[in-house]
Every structure is written in structure tokens, then in C-alpha cells.
Image (tube, rainbow, N blue to C red):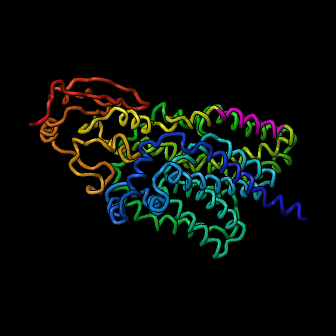
Amino acid sequence: MRRVALFHLLVPAVPALVTLLVASWQVTGPSYWRDEAATVSAVSRPLPALLRMLTHVDAVHGAYYLIMWPVAKVAGTGEIAMRLPSVAAMAVTAAFIAVIGARLVSERTGLAAGLVWAVLPGTSWYGQDARSYAMATTLACVASYLLLRLLDKPDRGRIAGYALALAAVGWISLFALLLVPAHGLTWLASRRKGTGRGWLAAAAAAVLVNVPLMIFAWRQRADIEWIPPLNQHEADTLLAWSGSPPASQVALLIVIAGIAFTGASGWLALRRGFPGTLLALCVPWALAPVAILTSASLVMPVFQFRYVLISVPAVSVLAGAAIGALGRAAGAGAAVVLTLVGIPGQVTDRYSAGHYDNIRYLDHVISAQMQPGDGVLYSWQGWRQAAAAYPYGIAQLDDIALAQDPVTAGNLLGTDLPTAQIARKLASVKRVWLLQATFSPPDSLLEKHGFRLMKSWWITSVWLRLYTRPGFQGHK
């Protein structure tokens, strides 16, 4: 009995510990990227200023910022402090994935599912990301587990707990509320009598308490106007749903192999390895949020894979069931192959440029060559928030076009001066650093005012260019 009880405890504990170790490995490897810089900017300001900012921009991330604000005040805004909450969230996610797998199939399935989650490259990528998506994924797993409990026994306590978890999913990441229709399909497929009223009440309550946030999000919809229409990039991110294409393909092959293997043994074996409750939960959970967000993007572009990261745990549970169904030897072999094919992605994600932008290196270049009085201009205003990432480099330059800083303006980018005032400020500057996004048109303002390009650096996703004005002596 003691061995059984110990194994029961180890089923969630082992995947959580492995995830914690893997996601913590080189957590400071990748540089902050611009979205993480937005987090740093938001949580660095006084609380009243943060609340004021949320009335103008990023209300959908408000709950996350409010969670991270005391973290920043206590531990600072370094990469370890800002990313460890996401690492912890991914570890908790692994525990709930294991518990769900054990509840639906077996403890072996739960253990395998949690370990699958631990070794996926995407788990570490988002675990090492100071944004809300790891926490949203955790809450999606909590809500899914509580849904199973509600479907077993729809008493008031379970209904209330599920409603609260589902509401929290929306508070932390509004698009994660796409879990609601997925759970609706699970409820319909489960055919559990007496559960309909409870589930509908909980789902309605969760959506209702998120209505104020939805109103703010609609008013701030300009925040996502940068999202392009559906294109090949979106298709590629879907194909790499696990964080890397090879790991994604192997994980799906494991699921297919597990179903084929158990199916070959007969209908009873198939139902035992992949019971109806497993499929009723995981298939809608994996597919519905992606399908809905993709369909909505045909009308208004809103698709980014991180918005539906909440669907990935469902595939981990299915992969865990497949590994359990394949038997000890074949299942262990499949798990090892999945781990090995994911290693290149794990390593690449921890490079300095592993998270899209390499602000850290950009700042190092500037700090090594900057001179007193140097200014900075941005060909695209969106790059200004990179100045919040680190205290050296960009943050030390005079922002020539800045009229109001982000805190004063109550946003993340501040406001710009009119072109004429920018030109007058340039008259007193000898050297200017220009951050030029690849899609920006050539900048002629500096050349018109006598500046000449001295040097350029291509740093992952942006051109850093140093301009100087020959013969400039300054004002006497």
C-alpha cells in the first residue's frame, strides 16, 4: 500500500520537477525580446501609473502585470526574477497534465504525459518568457481538471471552483477563454446526465465576469493591429506547435502509433488505452481554440500561436496515453526519441537570439561605443519599448523624438515630437544611433541634416546604424 501511495504522489511530482529543471536550465540565455521589455516597462512603474497605463493599452495583460509588479519590487527586473514565475507555471502545468492523464487512463499514462510536456521545446521557450502565456496554460489545465471533477459530481463546490478557474483563464489571457467552447464540446460528448445546468452556469459566470475586460480589449484593439493576415508564417507555427517541427512530428507519430497499436489488439484494447472520456476532453481542447482563432482571422487578423498555447497540454496527454499503450519497451523508446529530437530546439532557444530579438547584444554594441551626448531615433516606434529591457545601451541614449516618456503618456511607447522639433533637436547632436526595422522605409531625415552613415550592424531582427555629422563642433 505504501508503494502504491508513493507512486501516486510521484506521478505529478516527477514531471513537475523535471519540467522545473529543464525550463530553469540557462534561463538567462535568451535575451529579452520586445514583449518581455513591455513587461519590464509595465511593472517598473509605480502602481497608480501601471493602473493608468492599463486604461490605455495592454488591459488584456493587466492581471499578469499585477502579479509581476510585486515580484519586480522585491526581486528586481532581471531575467531570472521576471522569468522564474513562468518556469514555475510550466512545472505546475506538468503536474496537472499528469493528474489528468492518471484520472482519465492510468498513472503510467499520467506520468508519461507529464514527462512529454517537460521535454517539449515550447515548454521551455514559454517557461523562459516573461509574459502571461505560461500562466494561462497552467490555468487551462486546472480548469480542465476541475471540469472532469464537475462532470463526475456536479455539486455547488465543484461548479464554483470550475467557474473561478475558468474566469481566471480569461483574466490572465483573454484569448484563452477559447477553452470555453472546447469544454462545451467535452460536456456534449460526455453525455453525463445532470451536469448540463452546472456546466452552463459556470461557463456563463466565467464569461460574464470577463465582459469588462472584453470591453477594454475591444477599445484597445489597436494593440493587435500589427498582426498580419493568415500566411505561411502562421502555418509554420502551427506545424511547429511543440516548439520545433521535428519534435511536433514525432509527438504526433507517437499518438498515431499508439492508437494503431491498441486498435490492432481489438476494440476493447483501444477503448482501454484511449477511453471516450480522454478523447472527449483532449480532442476539443487541442483543436477548438486553434480552429476558432484561425477562422476569426479570416475576418480580422488575430492569430498568433502563443494565444492558443493552452491547447498544447491536450496533445501531451494524448501522447502520454500512446506511450502507455505501446508498452514499457516501445513506450520508453518513443519517449527517448521525442526527447532527443527536441534537444536541438532546446539548445537553439537558449541562444542570445533565441526569443526573436537580441536586445541584450544590441545594448552591448551601443554601450561599448557610445559617447556622451549620443542620441537615438527609431524608424518604427515599436522598437522604443526595447529601451526598457536593460539599464545600459539604448536606455542611456537621448531619445531625440520623444515628447512624453511612456510613464507620463500612460502607455508603453510614449509620444513623438513633430518632425520640425525633431529637426531642431538634431541641430545640437553629433552622433545618432538609428534602430531600423526591416520593413521600415529608408530614413532620409538624418542625411538631410548633414549626418553620414558610419557603421551598421544587423542584429537578429533590426538594423542598428550609427550616424555622425562630420565637422560638428557643437554650440559655442
* Residue at the left extreme of this rendering: 476
In which quadrant of the rendered view does residue 339 lie?
Answer: top right
**Closer to the camera in the image, 82 or 251:** 82
State left or right for residue 407 relative to residue 243: left
Please report the residue visible at 77 percent of the width from the left and 43 percent of the height from the top. Answer: 322
Please report the residue visible at 56 percent of the width from the left and 70 percent of the height from the top. Answer: 201
Q: Position of residue 93 (x, y in %)?
A: 64, 54
Residue 332 is a magenta residue: yes
Q: Tell me if residue 292 can be seen.
A: no
In which quadrant of the rendered view does residue 136 lie?
Answer: bottom right
* Residue at the front extreme of this rendering: 476
Q: Quadrant of the C terminus?
A: top left
Please report the residue visible at 13 percent of the width from the left and 42 percent of the height from the top. Answer: 421
Query: Where does the magenta region start and end?
Result: 330-343
Where 109 falls versus 244 (above or below)?
below
Q: Position of residue 284 (x, y in %)?
A: 62, 50
Q: Quadrant of the N terminus?
A: bottom right
State left or right for residue 64 relative to residue 426: right
Q: Position of residue 313 (x, y in %)?
A: 64, 49
Where 14 falls versus 327 (above or below)?
below
Q: Position of residue 368 (x, y in %)?
A: 37, 33
